[in-house]
């Protein structure tokens, strides 16, 4: 397992996905580290490998459809669905909230694996899980590439992550002086 973790970290480093500076995360928290999955997604061989590893960790999960929230989960969700031979849907933002559009429908009871790239608090993943329920599907599990919640994210369905990268996060009102001195970036999720 340690070798696999090293392989995953090396993919992140090679792609420039693991950044250092002063970042505002989608959660609104601040961090000295940022994981920009889009950098990994430029190299489809990396995407294929990471999706395969994540799918192997989810081998016990029975699903027929993958749903990924935009933007972060789009590429990894699609590749995981391709490898699993599953149907693929995505949720996208409309007026700041995730919704199903483009004629996407779920059958009553359809077993759905929700796939996300990175979670800190898990807000987009929770939205995606609720979308599945609102549209009659059954969310059977959540699979994420990177858990940066420090084990604090809570979901009411089983969930797995490919790797945990726990970096300190801070509310804007409680920044360490060294972090506060750096220019703020909001690179997007």
Image (cartoon, rainbow, N blue to C red):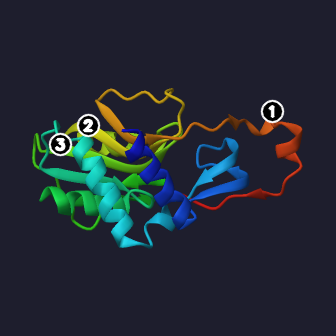
Q: Secondary structure at mark 2?
A: strand
- Give the residue at mark 1: 174
- The span from disc 2 to disc 1 (Cα, nearest Å) is 34 Å
Report whether residue 95 is seen.
Answer: no
- The span from disc 3 to disc 2 (Cα, nearest Å) is 12 Å
Q: Position of residue 136 (x, y in %)?
A: 17, 42
Q: Quadrant of residue 30?
A: top right
Asked whether 79 or 99 is in front, the reply is 79
Image-based side of 44 in relation to 176, left or right = left
Asked whether 75 or 42 is in front, the reply is 42
| Residue at position x 12%, y 44% in the image | 110
- The span from disc 1 to disc 3 (Cα, nearest Å) is 41 Å
**First along the sequence among labels 1 and 3:** 3
Q: Quadrant of the C terminus?
A: bottom right
Q: Position of residue 104 (x, y in %)?
A: 21, 61
Q: Is residue 34 above or below residue 141?
A: below
Q: Residues within 10 Å of mark 3 (few under 14, many from 20)?
A: many
| Cβ–Cβ under 8 Å for marks 1 and 3 | no
Q: Secondary structure at mark 3?
A: loop
Q: Residues within 10 Å of mark 2 (few under 14, many from 20)?
A: many
Front disc: 1 or 3: 1
Q: Position of residue 71 (x, y in %)?
A: 44, 61
Q: Quadrant of residue 69?
A: bottom left
- Give the residue at mark 2: 141
Q: Quadrant of the N terminus?
A: top left
Q: Position of residue 134 (x, y in %)?
A: 26, 41
| Residue at position x 63%, y 38% in the image | 167
**First along the sequence among labels 2 and 1:** 2
Report whether residue 64 is seen.
Answer: yes
- Give the residue at mark 3: 137
């Amino acid at each position: 397992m340690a070798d696999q973790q090293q392989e995953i970290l090396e993919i992140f480093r090679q792609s420039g996905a693991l950044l250092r500076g002063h970042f505002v995360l989608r959660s609104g928290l601040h961090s000295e580290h940022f994981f920009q999955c889009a950098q990994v997604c430029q190299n489809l061989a990396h995407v294929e490998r990471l999706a395969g590893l994540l799918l192997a960790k989810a081998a016990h999960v029975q699903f027929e459809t993958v749903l990924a929230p935009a933007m972060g989960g789009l590429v990894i969700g699609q590749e995981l669905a391709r490898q699993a031979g599953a149907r693929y849907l995505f949720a996208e933002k409309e007026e700041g909230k995730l919704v199903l559009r483009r004629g996407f429908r779920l059958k009553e009871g359809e077993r759905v694996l929700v796939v996300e790239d990175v979670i800190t608090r898990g807000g987009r993943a929770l939205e995606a899980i609720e979308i599945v329920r609102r549209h009659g599907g059954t969310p059977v599990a959540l699979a994420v590439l990177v858990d940066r919640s420090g084990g604090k994210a809570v979901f009411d369905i089983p969930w797995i992550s490919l790797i945990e990268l726990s970096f300190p996060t801070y509310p804007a009102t409680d920044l360490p002086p060294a972090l506060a001195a750096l220019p703020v970036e909001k690179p997007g999720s």
